[in-house]
Amino acid sequence: MVSRDYIRRREQRTGWLLMLPALLVLLLVYAFPILRAFWLSFFTENLSTNLEPVFSGLDNYGLMVGDGRFWQSMRNTAVFTLFTLFFELGLGLIIALALDQAFRGRGLARTIAILPWALPTALIALAWRWIFNTEFGVWNDMLMRLHLIGNPVNWLGEPFWAMVAVIAADVWKTTSFVAILLLAGLQSISQDLYEAHALDGASPWQSFRQITLPLIAPQIVITMLFRFAQSFGIFDLIQVMTGGGPGGATETVSIYIYAAVMRYLDFGYGAALVTVTFLVLVAVVALSWLYISRLRAKTE
Amino acid sequence: MAKLELQNLAKAYSRDIVPVKQLNLVVEDNEFLTLVGPSGCGKSTILRLIAGLDQPTEGRVMIGDRDVSPLPPGDRNIAMVFQSYALYPHMTVRDNVASGLKLRHLPAGDIQKRVQEVSGVLGLDPLLDRKPAKLSGGQRQRVALARALVRNPDVFLLDEPLSNLDALLREQVRADLKQIFADQKSPIVYVTHDQTEAMTLSTKVAVLNNGYLQQLGHPHDIYKTPANRFVASFIGSPQMNLVTLSRTGNTVTLSDFTIPLPIGIQAASVVLGIRPEHLRLPREGDAHTVSGQVFLVENLGMHDLVSLRVQGDPTLTLRALLPADAAWSRENLQLALPPESIHWFDGDTEQRLTT
């Protein structure tokens, strides 16, 4: 006689065995590097120690508190993330609503919309660097032909405009992707609901507020989360367009970490920077996740 | 209250796709009109035209003396029950039902009162704070009904409201619907492809095919005197036997059997129609009988649906509904065709020939 307990234990064992390979890979690829970086952040390992790890406790974190360049990069990252997220969501929603309408050539429009996102970021960054080039850039040429500026402006050389330029480039590249994610949400809303709402006496704006927005709220939050994680870790676009310049005006945390490790060979400090960035990211994602689950509980 | 009137209503999506052609219809107060027809006959399009969800290519929709054709759906004071129910998934039952009243800015007290009234009638009280996802199919259906009833609209539209329910529940809800709408003053337009619903619920049935109105009348009249071959074949279950016959003088021959034509029929070719429930075992004095070999018996409980090949012409089959307890021979079944139950249609125009 086989007891029920025995069968359950056997099934659990099989379950763990089946998950083991995946768990091992995850451990090796994700957990190990994270823990390794965390461990390394308690050591000083740079040119002054001949690249030998020397235990230094919380020294790296202490340095970070007084490191203006670190705070500057954090601020830049926050500004970049906030503005790209705002514009990408806003414009993405407008484009998604447009693409959700029935019109001739909708399939073509949808395909074209996704193109900017499908192109390699490094290429796009190069293109935008040329667009904003002082002497040969299309942007200066256009503005001068329209008599909006008298002399060519060095867009990527001005701290403020450089930030605007990288934000614009990122918005151009990623808005379409956001639009496609939101479009998927819009398409899951049955047309019947809008028709029933119209018969109930709702205006299109009321339907947007009372039907569309609440029903795509989960997609909006997930898209935001996704875009937040990507924007927060932005590297390639800015590295190619401005290299973090001018004078650190567009230097984000990722670029600073890259510089600390690859240029200054300060591995311990770089590891501490990675750890802090990682924790900030985890905290934001966890908070959002909590919010989403509450939202879900509300709609079900 | 207000009557609903469709004047020369037509809808064309393109030159070849014309779901509604020149429709004229009046639905008075207290009338329950059912639009019935096969898929693609234009019945749902008509409903959408009345609701204002689609714009007609021609013609007008009148409610009372008001031409509502140019008005958006929300200004027509029409309530519609969708086949999918179209409940707002993120709102509670209460908010779903109240939605139309809130959008019309009724005082909160009135809204609460009316929601309560309707929810009482439909037995929704224990469900008011639930979301649609937590309801069964029948409950969702009742919420959709409540959302329409609570509005006191000038016209009710129902688009196949029972088609998503299982057979048993459908029968029960059908009976409930009949009671609920018996108390309503406003015209009701109901769309279905189910002729049982059409027959049981309506005071008036409109049979549609290919965008044209085939017949409009009381369910009883439509069953009793179908206006043409299409209506005859569409209304009634099991389907009416329809046989195209060639005529010789004032008689037609049904294989080996001769049947006289009623006086006054001029048509060159005729179609004889007789419902399976009107074919019966012969009694003494029956003038017209046919016989043949039974090749299929379907047991329907109270009746047997018997299919037979008419003697002398194996391609000619008839179906008859016979009492389950009757005794008959499979090899040579004799059936009587009572003359008063025979329908005659013109073989070319397919229109009814006798009245």
Image: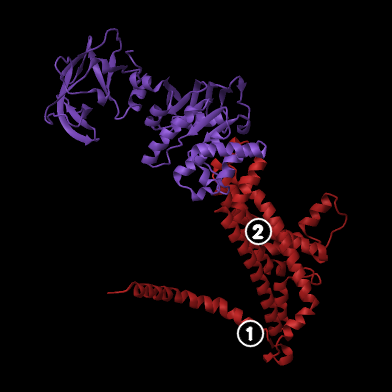
Along the line of sight, which residue is nearer the eye, B105 or B216? B105
Along the line of sight, which residue is nearer the eye, B271 or B340? B340
Residue B111 located left or right of residue A131: left
Residue kind at label 1, given as amino acid type:
Trp
Along the line of sight, which residue is nearer the eye, B223 or B350? B223
Task: Provide residue A187's location: percent of width, then percent of height.
Answer: 56, 48
In the rendered view, would you say B271 is above or below B51?
Answer: above
Q: Secondary structure at mark 2?
A: helix
Task: Provide residue B309's location: percent of width, then percent of height.
Answer: 18, 28
Q: Report the residue that reaches farthest toward the right.
A: A150
Instruction: Report which residue position mark 1 lands on.
Output: A39
Q: Is residue A98 visible?
A: no
Q: Which chain is purple?
A: B
Instruction: Report which residue position mark 2 lands on.
Output: A174
Q: Which chain is red?
A: A
Label 2 resides on the chain identified as A
Residue B49 located left or right of residue B273: right
Q: Are marks 2 and 1 on the same chain?
A: yes
Q: Residue at x 57, y 57 (%)?
A: A297
- Numbered badge on residue B275: none
In the rendered view, would you say B128 is above or below B354?
Answer: below
Disc number lying in front (2 or 1): 1
Q: Earlier in the sequence, mark 2 or mark 1?
A: 1
In the rendered view, would you say B269 is above or below A43?
Answer: above
Residue kind at label 2, given as amino acid type:
Thr
